[in-house]
Amino acid sequence: MPCGCSATGGPPASWVQGDSVAWTVSAPAHPSASGWSLKTSLRPAGAAAVVVDGVASGPTEYRFALTPAQTSAMPAGAVAWQTRASNLALVETIAAGRSLSCPDLTAPGFDPTTPSERMLAALLAIGPQVMASGYASMTVDGMLVQFRSLDEYFRALASTRQQVAEEKAALSPCEGGTGARGNRRRILARFTTP
């Protein structure tokens, strides 16, 4: 445990937005009968902290829970957390770590495509217009993109295709990627007998 923390347990390694999340912390040095109480603060990247009070569920066990509304409000990504014990004027950090808030794939408006994939789709959609006039403009993710020549368009198309391919290669096969993780130095060999 980091920083010489004295408790075991904490939020799970990951959860899905909109799910209920519960965990137990064991704090032998901080029994509830002696007046100790526990709070866990969870801070998602770029968002306000969510503070959850522990409820004593045994002499040195405390139960914590996040509601579906609380996990829905947390943006997807890394969540740093710490559990603190307090008793009158004494305050101690007894556990800390990181968890992952995963996106709810069933949420209305969820778009699993990356910005590069959206840019590639837009480039392919305006291709006929560029071919006909040599000029086109479009807006993708709030960004205005203009092409004044076929050369500019084809450079952007090639670059975006490469970026999408690299993103796919960085994903594992179970995530829909190739699993290559950017390894471009593969050597394929065939051994035959004469």
Image (spheres, helix red, strand yellow):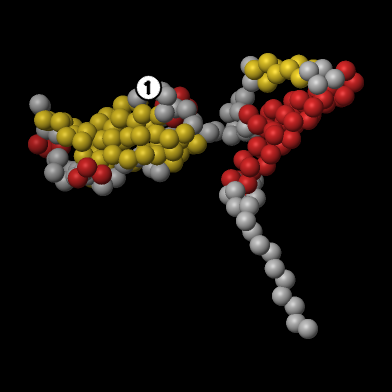
Q: In terms of depth relative to the viewer, which is nearer, 151 or 158?
A: 151
Residue 181: x, y in percent?
58, 49
Q: Residue at x 28, y 39 (%)?
A: 96
Residue 130: x, y in percent?
84, 22
Q: Few, some or many C-alpha atoms within 10 Å of disc 1 (few <14, some 14-19, many ≥20)?
A: few
Q: Mark 1 points at which residue?
A: 48
Q: Which residue is drawn at 64% across and 59% down?
A: 186
Q: Is residue 94 visible?
A: yes
Q: Can residue 172 be seen in this view?
A: no
User: In the visual, does 147 lie left or right of 63?
Assistant: right
Number of numbered callouts drawn: 1
Residue lying at the far bottom in this picture: please name it.
194
Residue 137 against residue 163 in the figure, above or below: above
Q: Which of the 4 image quarters holds residue 190?
A: bottom right
User: In the visual, does 44 lie left or right of 62?
Assistant: right
Q: In terms of depth relative to the viewer, which is nearer, 45 or 99?
A: 45
Point out the image quarter for the C terminus.
bottom right
Q: Could you tell me the amino acid type at mark 1?
A: Ala
Residue 108: x, y in percent?
61, 25
Residue 185: x, y in percent?
62, 56
Q: Which of the 4 image quarters holds residue 115?
A: top right
User: In the visual, does 174 lie left or right of 135?
Assistant: left
Q: Which of the 4 image quarters holds residue 32?
A: top left
Q: Which residue is drawn at 73% across and 17% down?
A: 146
Residue 185 against residue 131 in the figure, above or below: below
Q: Which residue is drawn at 22% across and 33% down?
A: 84
Q: What element carries label 1?
A: loop
Q: In terms of depth relative to the viewer, which is nearer, 184 or 32?
A: 184
